[in-house]
Image (cartoon, rainbow, N blue to C red):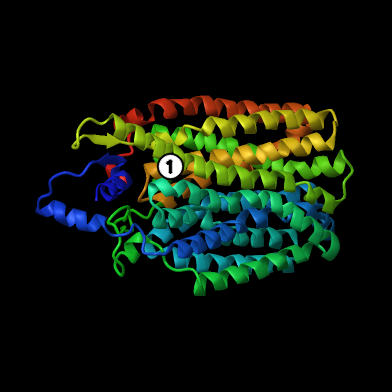
Amino acid sequence: MADALKEIRCESQDTVASSGPSGGSNKQLDADMELPYSHFSAKSRIMIVVITAFTGLISPLASNMYYPSITAVRDDLNTTQSGITWTITAFVIAMAIFPLLWSNLADSIGRKPVYALSMLIFTCGSVGCALSRSLTALIAARVVQSAGSSAVQSAGAGTISDIYPREQRGTALGIYYLGPLLGPCLGPLIGGYIGQDAGWRWVFWVLAILGGVLLLLALFVLPETHRRIVSKAHSIQPVNIPPALSLKDNNPLLDIATVRYPVVALSMFLFAMLFGTYFTNATAQPLAYEGIYGLSQGMSGLCFLSSGVGCILGSTSGGRVTDLLLARHRKALEAAADSERVEIKIPAEARLGAMWVGISMFMCAVIICGWLIEYKLALAGVLVVQFFIGAGMAFTFQSLGGYLIDVFPTRSARITGVQNFWRSLWAAVIVQLFPTMHENIGWGWSYTVMFFLTLAALLLMQVAVFRGERLRQRFGPGPELR
């Protein structure tokens, strides 16, 4: 009974209390705490995580599969390089905005209908891209494609929070983040060979087929997980069950405004600098592989396997490490308690303890990569540091993503949508700036600039690491927003 009490209170308010004498109300609480956190079996939860991760792969996959064929698209549509770049920028901007709308919808009507509707929109957008005969039509279809594919960027984290308690969530998030993080690595590999052998339009036909498969999975396999909806039909712990929201509460601008809280602002700044650097590196690598090292379009895509393997190892290990950090923190506090009625607080910042491992790896690899390419040194060295870029990025994502979900346990989808907004917005900016940076200051200094931007964000984030709990108590967010 004490263990159940500890788990539920850790979930609801980041505190753990030992059980003691119970009154009438405590007996009901005890009965509630004997219920499972989620009614889904272990196998069902794994299935849900895999489908969610696979669906989360769609957005970055659709974005990056297209890159190796940009030259062919430009020539086929008889446009300019600056014109064709807007097909990338428009996709990323839409990827920043639409998750805010999807996350609100997912918190209102549930996860399942959002997944199904978004995959239908994505499939239609992919068909539109494949049939485009002008630059304007392609840009419009890319916006539709991005609008549909971006739903799981925010709703996916909400699904994980629905079915896993706090101290198991990091491992599940590690699997889920494999989708969004592997997309920039697998996209060029798959798209490179498809575009080379079948033409650029087949890149979008393949995406349309994949979207159709995911639509069927959302309709007929994926169950509803939203805790408020599930609790009406099943007996589960009364933890992290968000209240029904009014129309006023379903305002994406209010979600964006959470950046007014210091811990959120610091986290978003680091997320943006980290992801912007990672995304820019992913889009720039084909230029280096094909322009400097003389690789074919297909072989250029194959080089992305290096960072892809890094993402897999970083994401799975990072999620597990954050869970272990919480468990160790909890045991240390329990051992220090000298009374059964002492309330033990486990701050959300406990999940940030190992963040420096991943981000240090990422930053060192970024600056080394830039100068290896600048001096046209061995391709093998570039591929090695790309592995560490992927591993460092994925590892850090677990700490930051899990931290924000712990701060907003009943608004996990919405805070993830906000996170996606800021990081995608900066990615759209830096991707547009990189060609000018590259032409004027070269590869080495361009990557050095991104290194120092990420370093500045990391140094500022230390305020949240060491003073985050005090900042939240003084400046918010308050309990009504959690």
- Residue 360's place in the image compared with 65, above or below, is above
Left or right of 132? Residue 78 is right
Considering depth in this image, is 53 or 211 the residue closer to the camera? 53
Instruction: Locate the C terminus and report the quarter of the image it occupies.
Output: top left
Q: Position of residue 28 (x, y in %)?
A: 16, 57
- Confirm whether residue 264 shows in the render: no
Left or right of 102? Residue 109 is left
The residue at the point 65 percent across, 67 percent down is 210
Q: Where is residue 438 in the image (x, y as percent from the top left)?
A: 77, 33
Amino acid type shown at disc 1: Leu
The residue at the point 66 percent across, 48 percent down is 89
Q: Hey, which quadrant is residue 469 in on the image? A: top left
Q: Position of residue 220 (x, y in %)?
A: 51, 75
Considering depth in this image, is 132 or 68 the residue closer to the camera? 68
Q: Hey, which quadrant is residue 360 in on the image? A: top right
Q: Hey, which quadrant is residue 74 in on the image? A: bottom right
Looking at the image, the residue that sits furthest to the left is 24
Secondary element type, mark 1: helix
Left or right of 7? Residue 80 is right
Q: Where is residue 120 in the image (x, y as percent from the top left)?
A: 57, 69
Looking at the image, the residue that sits furthest to the right is 294
- Confirm whether residue 358 shows in the render: yes
* Within-10-Å neighbours for mark 1: few <14, some 14–19, many 20+: many
Where does label 1 land, which residue? Answer: 404
